[in-house]
Image (cartoon, helix red, strand yellow):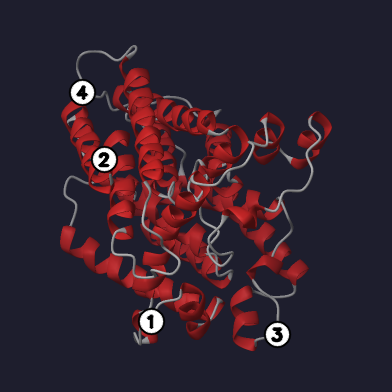
Amino acid sequence: MYICLLISLFLLILLGLFLYKSWLNPVSIFNLVWLIVCFLYGFRLSPRLQANLTDHTCYFLILGNVVFTIACIIVNKISVNATFISKFEKKEIAFENIKRHFWIWFVIEIFETIYSRGFPIIWSLQHNGKTYFDYGIPSLHGFANAYGLSILTILAYLLFKGNNKCASKIRIYIIVILFMYLLMLTRQVIISAIIQIFVVYCFLKKKVPVVKIVLISLIIIIAFGLLGNVRTGYSEFLNVADIDTGIHPVFVGFYWVYMYLTMTIANLNKLFNMTFSPLGVGYFCSIYLPTIIANLLFKTGSVDQSVYLVTQAFNVSGYNADAYISLGLVGIVIMALIYGALGGGLYKKLVRKRNMKNIIYYAIYIQIIVLSFFFNQLFYLPSGFQFVIIYLLFKRVRFRK
């Protein structure tokens, strides 16, 4: 059944390419991500943590991707014109405007740093017992990350569009934001930023330098591993990953990436084959609503989610795990429908009007589905709230032809 899973995902990729005539379509990208993850899982480099996939797991994975694909295509086709030629209208935020937001974000981060009494990267080097979880103010930190990612993506757009007058300043602002995230040791936000910047680049540049992208990707993977060595420790990672290897610490990033990609499948494989009663709509809503609102509307006790994981060291379970715990098979369908429908709608807007706002919306969405193997990015404050921030930033911007 594992081979059928891989073939199904491959066919869905081809379907997206056939329908949209572009490799940047949501159907192909989403299914490609899950094809890569499932294919890599087949190597089972950590066999004691990564059991053989059951037929049950394969059926559920296929179901989620098929539902996503159908929802995306239907929403995209409902009112799309026969032609896919976009009218390029300008609806842009000027550098002078986004510069003010940059300084607001920067002040928030300085305030969080003072409140936290330092940066996580310094704590890790000092081995003082504090981690990146101790940085920032809850909720405010998530908002600040979303704010910074939104500003960063807009700056990247302005840079790639050819704003020559302010190009040097834009580069400095981009470097400052990325450097701040490096000091926070927030690899997830850094990866999200890189994905969004890359998507914007693909829409604004005619040629994509494949060789450079491969080299940059290798550098990012190595850097990802080095950051992991600082945050968790080289020996500790090999221990929790249960990998029997003597790989050099500099290149351990390849194993970091492999484990994060594939442990979602291992956790889903355990979850989909467990016998338990779904926790219900209350638990489902409590995950995606602010805590105060959820407590007012629903009475849900604390849930030990570690029982659904192969190991607590890798708590990644993809975009639909919580939905399955809450509603069972129905939860998988609902979450796939939400992701697919949103992708179809955003891609339709992009095709009709390839303006700054729609490109950035779509870049955020692509980041969300590319990291859908990680967890539910759509309902994760630093990722999903970017849609709200971008909407508010563009609310007063007029079209200029």
Mark 2 nearby-residue class (10 Å; few <14, some 14–19, many ≥20): many
Q: Position of residue 261 (x, y in %)?
A: 39, 59
Query: Secondary structure beneath disc 1?
Result: loop
Q: Which residue is mark 2?
A: 9
Real-space Cα distance between discs 4 and 1? 52 Å
Say which amino acid is labelled 2. Leu
Q: Which residue is mark 1?
A: 244
Q: Which residue is mark 4?
A: 85
Q: Which residue is mark 3?
A: 128
**Among the two numbered marks 2 and 3 on one chain, the one whose residue lies closer to the N terminus:** 2
Q: Position of residue 237 (x, y in %)?
A: 49, 77
- Establish if 210 lies above or below 100: below
Residue in view at x 18 percent, y 45 percent: 206
Real-space Cα distance between discs 2 and 3? 46 Å
Residue 374 seen from this side: no
Q: Position of residue 122 (x, y in %)?
A: 62, 81
